[in-house]
Amino acid sequence: MVTGSSSGIEEAIVTLFSRLSAQDVVTGRNADKVSRPLTFVGDLMKDENIEQLVKTVEKHGVSFLLQSISKAAIDMEVKNLALEFGPKGVHVNSVNPGIIKTPASQPYLDDENYLKEAKNYSVFQRVGEIDDIAKAVVFLASNASSFITGTNLAVNGGFLLK
């Protein structure tokens, strides 16, 4: 299942899976976009508390602190789910992207100073492409990663090395 897959990185992941004849479950808020490889359309956030949090964040903007906290929580949830579902043969992993060129990041990358700084974060002196992320997800979903679970795969051009 790929959530939020009607645009950006997630759309590229679903596109690559489709080219490889995978059966996808696609979710997103934009029914027209999701219907291209449509299997399921729906809002996965039903809990009123989560909805209120989303409204608050939308109203006031996402802080780096909130983003960091949520990413750390997801990293730990991957490990917990891997422990819980591993005995049933289920692999649970995540991909942690670095600075990736997406429609959402494009306005920032259009700024020459930001782009220069973003490239400096990578040992390859470039920003990532959505296909870099899609290929990592396909690898983790394939038999080639049959002994990998509970992993948060950093696909960031060596960001953590600098």
Image (cartoon, rainbow, N blue to C red):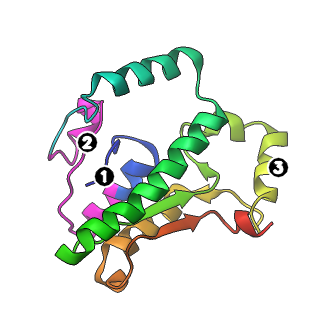
Q: How crowded is mark 3: few (under 14 residues within 10 Å), some or many (20 or more)?
A: some
| Inter-mark Cα distance, 2 to 1 | 7 Å
Q: Residues within 10 Å of mark 2 (few under 14, many from 20)?
A: many
Q: Is mark 3 on a helix, strand or loop?
A: helix
Q: Could you say which disc has been placed on residue 117 in the image?
A: 3
Q: Mark 1 points at which residue?
A: 2
Depth check, front residue: 88 or 14: 88
Dominant SS type (magenta): loop
Q: Residue at x 29, y 64 (%)?
A: 17
Which mark sits nearer the N-terminus, 1 or 3?
A: 1
Above or below, 55 relative to 133: above
Which mark sits nearer the N-terminus, 3 or 2?
A: 2
Mark 1: amino acid: Val
Magenta span covers which residues? 14-39
Evaluate if marks 3 and 2 touch, with contact meaning CB atoms under 8 Å apart: no
Which mark sits nearer the N-terminus, 2 or 1?
A: 1
Instruction: Give x and y (percent) for residue 10.
Output: 39, 50
Work out which quarter of the rendered image holds the C terminus and state it.
bottom right
Residue furthest to the top in view is 59
Instruction: Give x and y (percent) for residue 32.
Output: 25, 31
- Asked if the magenta segment contains residue 77, the reply would be no
Evaluate if marks 2 and 1 touch, with contact meaning CB atoms under 8 Å apart: yes
Determine which quarter of the picture holds residue 90: bottom left
Work out which quarter of the rendered image holds the N terminus and state it.
bottom left
Q: Mark 2 points at which residue?
A: 27
| Inter-mark Cα distance, 1 to 3 | 30 Å
Above or below, 54 relative to 116: above
Mark 3: amino acid: Glu
Q: Is residue 158 left or right of residue 142?
A: right
Q: Which residue is drawn at 37% across and 62% down?
A: 80
| Inter-mark Cα distance, 3 to 2 | 33 Å
